[in-house]
Image (cartoon, coloured by chain):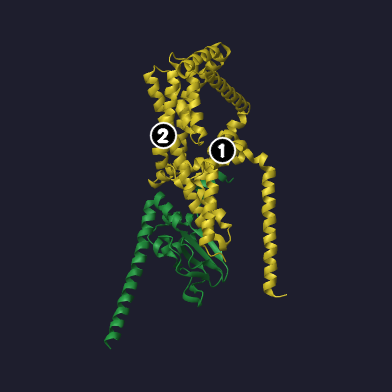
Chain colours: A green, B yellow
Amino acid sequence: MANPIWDYFFKKPSAAKESILQKLKDVPIFSDLNEKELLEVEKIVHRRKYQKGEPVFRMGDPGLGMYIIIEGNVDIVEESADEGQKQLANLQEGAFFGDLALLDEAPRSASAIAKTDCDIIGFFRPDLLDLLYRKPQIGIKILFALAQVVGERLRKTNDALSELQRKCGEKKNE
Amino acid sequence: MSSSSLSSSWSVTRTIWTIFLIITGVAFLILIYPYIKMTVIMLVISWIISIVLNPAVDYLESIGAKRSLAIFLVMLSILLILVGIVALMLPAVMRAIDAISAKMQSDFLKDVTVQMEQIFEKNFNNAGLARDLINKLVEIGGNLLGNMGSLLKNASSFVAFLGIIPFVTFFLIKDRRKIYHNMIAQIPNKYFEMTLNVLYKVGDQVTKYIQGQALDALIVGLLSALGLLIINLVFNHPIPYFFFIGLIAGIANLIPYLGPVVGAIPAIVMTILNAPPNVGTVILWIVVVFVLVQVIDNNIVSPLVVSKSVNMHPITVVIAVIIGGNIGGVVGMLVAVPVWGIIKVTVKEVYWGLQHYKLR
């Protein structure tokens, strides 16, 4: 006969959990984690379902954390009183967004709105800080990977800026 | 009828139902409160203990222990310390109670009153003050003994109460995140990020406040015991069970303003019962020790260890303690200020959330 206390302490991950783990593994900031470490992350993420047209977060809201799309489509849009909504990107299954909010509470630079019905995972800054304290080896791996993602983006921004400056220089010389 | 007017009438109906359900829920809680009072107090105590023990559990987890094992080790250590203290103190406390009863029945009180009157007459020219003081102390002592009697009458429920608290505390520490996740999962998407952010901030401030208060109580307890030890060394041991009295002072210190006075009473009573030759001087030194401990606590310890985020006006504190005392007796008084602090921080952070999030 099943013993609830025994089951409580020694239960195994379900198939649904396995699929979440695979999705997490595909996200760059979790790519260095092994299965046991991913299980720790899985315990602290929040799984949410959004209907088509429902905002995940709005531009100007205080940043709290990042989201990973398990199923569905999300539009990243810039909102202004004069011009309404301007689409910046359309993110598909497996994509992640809002990752800079893992570093500070600065206001969101754009809104994220579900384009279709979505299944999304949220990973938030206070949970990352808690993980850093409880499981420093996992927290450091995530932070290092996050720094690499931010560094890569900074390099791309620098390249784009250099390219723009070069083009401006050429235009001036003409 | 247009779809917008349909949706607005649906929204009004939903609001009315929400208000109706909230009022019904609150009325139901008030109705069943007398039956769930002990359970609520037990949950609040377990939750506060879980917050106090959590840093030690997190530390053990950070050096590689499994969470369940870490909780077990921390709780076992606390249990062993408590059992040790009780084992050391219980015979002494029983002896003290016997001594108090014996002395109450003898002419001891009359002798002490005469002696105190002489001291007060000589030093302050006011013998009546000594009589009033002794009468007040006897009254407080009588009340305390009466409370002990009623506590022993309900001994079985008290033991069950004590037995359940560690059990509930274990699961509150272990499943803190799971309980939290399950609660958050019920929040509509519209309020999800705001609720989460507000809960994190409230949780963080309340945790720091409660941990700070616990550390403050421990330091005040140790300082009081040290002060009483010094008096014992200087005046040839006039205060029995000084360590136990120090611990009581530390716990009593959790009740603002009233705590330090409550903490000093056992030391004074024990000294009077022990009747050393220089009883007046010893009592004066006990008062000096407790005042000194308060000065150190208010100016050095408290500003360093207790979070400033739950700063409260003295009047608010007194009102909270009175209400807490009416609801839950001594335990109610002890948890009144933290509970009021939680309400204050929650209101502040919810207001912050409503101002900063675009709720659509």
Q: Nearer the viewer, mark 2 or mark 1?
A: 2
Dot label at residue A143: none
Residue B152 position in % (x across, y down): 60, 26
The quarter of the rendered structure image containing the N terminus of chain B is bottom right
Q: Which mark is residue B295?
A: 2
* In the image, residue B39 above or below residue A30: above
Read off the chain for label 2: B
- Along the viewing direction, whichever of B301 and B242 lies nearer the viewer: B301
Horizontal relation, residue B346 to residue B81: left or right: right
Q: Chain of mark 1?
A: B
Residues B221 and B185: in front is: B221
Determine if residue A15 is in view. Answer: no
Element assignment for label 1: helix
Residue under label 1: B321
Residue B246 locus on image (x, y percent): 45, 28
Task: Look at label 2 and name its amino acid.
Answer: Val
The amino acid type of the residue labelled 1 equals Val
Around disc 1, counting alpha carbons within 10 Å, would you say few (fewer than 14), some (14 to 19), or many (20 or more)?
many
